Amino acid sequence: MSALLVLVVLVTAGCASGSGDESTGGMRAWVDERGQVRYTPASGEAPETSGESTGKTGSGEADVTRTVESSHPEFNLEQYPDAGDQDNSRETEELFYSWRDAQGRVHNTPYLYGEEALGRVMHEPEPVRASEARVTTSGATAAPGFRKDSEAAAILGVGEGSETRLDAFAQQCCGALPRLDYLQLEPERTLPVDLGEAADVYRFATGTSRFALVRLPPEPEQSLLRIRSFIRDGGFFLPNAVFLDGGFRPVRMVTDIVMEYSPETWRRYGHMEARLALKPDSGERWLVVFTRPEDLESGTMVGEEGRRRRLTHEPVGSLSLRLVD
C-alpha cells in the first residue's frame, strides 16, 4: 500500500513538471485584430497584453478573450494599429479609375477628387433647346406696308393687310383632314411614324404631301417634342409641323426646321433630329407632320469636312416622335 502511494506521488509530480515546461516552451495561440488565430513560440516571460475584451451572450456562451503581444517583431500594434486609433481626418489612399481606350487597352488613371480638379472635368450639362425654325402663330400679324408681290413679302411669307402664311394655310386645313388613322403620343414612349407609300395623302395650301396626324397629351410634363427622320438610301423625309387646337384650327406653323445629323452606328440608324417647343397653354391638341414640294427640290449637306455628302429630301420616309425635357 505504501509503495502504491509513492508511485502516485511521483506521477503527480511529473505531470506538474511537464505543465511547467509547456509554459516556458512550445506554441501560444492568440487572435489578432482581424479575428485570425495566430500561433507563435511561447517565451519564458508572461506576454504583455495590449487589451482584453470579454463578452458574454444571453445563451450562456463562454467568455471570449483576445490577447495581443505588443512586443512581437511582426504582430504588434505598430504594424497592426487599432482601427479606433487611426486618423481618418484626411484621405491617405490614392484612388484610381480604370478606362479602356479606342484600341482596347486598359489604363489606370489617378482620380483627382479635389474641388478644383472636379471643376476641370465636370460641368453642368447645357439645357436642351428647341431647334431653329421658321415659326408663325395665329396671334401674329403681318408687317404692314408690304405689297403682296414684293420681294420682302415673299421672303417673310406675308401678303397685304394682316393675313399671314398661317391664315393662308388654314384655308385648306384642317377641318376636312382625315381623322380615322390618327396616332396617340404618350409620355415616356417613342412613337414610330410610317410615311411610306401607303400613308394618307392630303392637298395642303403648300402642296400635296403624305402626312401623319398625331394627338398630343393634354398636359405633358416635358417641354420639347423630339422628331427623328431616319436616313434611307441617301435621303430622308424633311418634316414640317402644324399644331391644331381642339377644333382642328391651325394655331402654330413650324417650317424650315434646322435638323442635326447623327451618323449610323452599330446600335442605331442614321437620322436627322430636331426639337420643337410644346405650348399646351396655347390650346395645341393635335400635330400634323407633312412636307412641301419646295422641300423636295433641295437637299441637306452632312458630314465632316472632307467627307461631306448630300442627302436628298424624299416624299416618303420613317420618323419617330418622343417627348423630352
Image: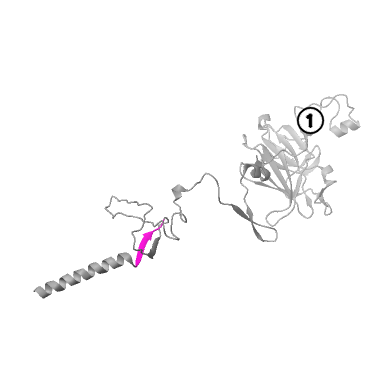
Location of the N terminus (image quadrant): bottom left
Residue 30 magenta-drawn?
yes
Q: Which residue is mark 1?
A: 167
State the image coordinates of residue 174 (x, y, percent, origin top left): 73, 35
Q: Among all residues in the image, which is located at the extreme bottom? A: 3
Q: Amino acid at mark 1?
A: Asp
Camera sees residue 301 = yes
Residue reaching furthest right? 150
Residue 119 % position (x, y): 66, 42
Residue 244 located left or right of residue 203: left
- Residue under the image location 42 percent in, 60 percent down: 72
For label 1, the crowd category at 10 Å Cα-Cα, with few meaning under 14, some 14 to 19 and many 20 or more, is some
Q: Nearer the viewer, residue 185 or 111?
A: 111
Magenta span contains residue 307:
no
Residue span colored magenta? 26-32
Say above or below: 313 vs 224: below
The quadrant the C terminus occupies is top right
* Residue closest to the eye, 30 or 271: 30
Which of the pair 147/212 is nearer the observer? 147
Residue 181 visible in image = no
Describe residue 27's horizontal placement relative to residue 150 as left or right. left
Q: As drawn, is 113 to the left or to the right of 30?
A: right
* Residue 35 vertical position relative to residue 227 in the rendered view, above or below: below
Residue 103 relative to residue 162: left or right: left
